[in-house]
Image (tube, rainbow, N blue to C red):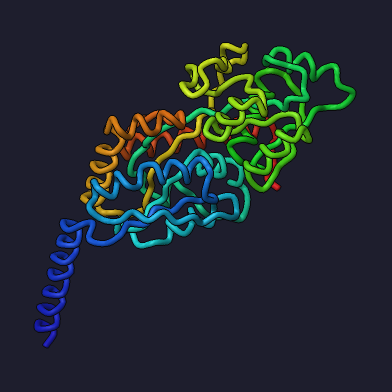
Amino acid sequence: MPRLLRWAAAVVAAWALISTASAQSNYPDKPIHFIVAFVPGGATDTFARQISVDLQEALGQPVVIENKPGAGGYIAWTHVASSDPDGYTLLLAENAVAISQALYKKTKSNFDPVTQLDAIAGLAASPSALLVANNIPVKTVAELIAYSKTQPKKMDFASAGVGSVSHLNFEVFMDKTGLQAVHVPYKGGGQAIGDVLAGHVPMTITSVQASKSLVESGKVKALAVTSPTRSAAMPNVPTMQEAGVAKADVELRFWFAVFGPKGMPDAVKAKLYQALAKVMNNPATHERLAKLDITPDLIDGPAMHAKLESEIKNWTRFIDAKGIKAE
């Protein structure tokens, strides 16, 4: 009887291996869900929707965008981390997944993207812009710094929330220029930009996608962009370095990458990377993304994993040195 049981167990194990191999070879055979940690209309959501149709064609299955905002991104991140590692639930993430790990590492949260997510690919990057309200009489970064010193109290700056890309980018800007300002966090980038447009808050740093039309229509002024070279979307706006701001050790552009739950089969990750590479190398994709000032910057999973670790390390060093605290 024991021998029979061992034989049966071996058959079941073999069948499981065959079934797993078959599932991997047939991947994907149902819709793939891309989870975005923020509301529709934001930079990450916009990027996801720009590539989803092409990715659907490359994979032969529908690609469904699911927005799971809340808790600074943790709702979406932990949802993906706890999903089956079968390649059907993926995370389209940005800098926030690294910045938040650096900012909240000492809290009770036990989420760790390095150990709980598999990096599939880094896809693209996009700069942010330093915006100043029209009621602030400056046209350059140097003028902004000089003007701030003439004010009886510190100026304010708006952000999409504590620990957001816009918040930390502005902290770096202040560190490199000596500008002193008071942080006014909002519950999203739209609200922050709205109060800068209304003149209630003097300045903010936000994505070029959100800035472009506002700058072109004269509703707000852009003093600099965070990319190493000038933005194709706003070619008349200098880079931070051109404006006299020293280079930072941290990445001041948005970057976009795809992750899955830890433990995804290598064959599935390889198929996903090949499909993503096909999309990001497509000239039509380049042309479409260029209108949003998003530049394809394709790197494979191991390179993206290393980038994530580096980002967390560099942001942790900066956040600790400046004593920036989570709310």
Residue 261 in sight here: no
In front here: 87 or 107? 87
Q: Residue furthest bottom?
A: 1
Q: Is residue 64 left or right of residue 1?
A: right
Residue at the spot 56% in from the left edge and 22% down from the top edge: 225
Q: Is residue 56 shown above or below 99?
A: below
Q: Residue at x 70, y 12 (%)?
A: 142
The answer to which quarter of the image holds residue 161 is top right
Q: Is residue 33 above or below residue 136?
A: below
Identify the residue at image location x=59%, y=50%. Answer: 72
Residue 87 placed where, x, y %? Answer: 30, 55
Q: Nearer the viewer, residue 238 or 74?
A: 238
Can you tell which quarter of the image residue 247 is in? top right
Give how far across and how far down residue 253 sits, in percent.
51, 29
Residue drawn at x 55%, y 39% is 99
Q: Is residue 142 above or below residue 277?
A: above
Looking at the rendered image, the quarter that the N terminus falls into is: bottom left
| Residue 307 shows in this picture | yes
Figure check: 321 above or below 66: above
Q: Is residue 113 left or right of residue 39?
A: left
Q: Nearer the viewer, residue 214 or 259?
A: 214
Residue 15 at x, y percent in the picture: 13, 71
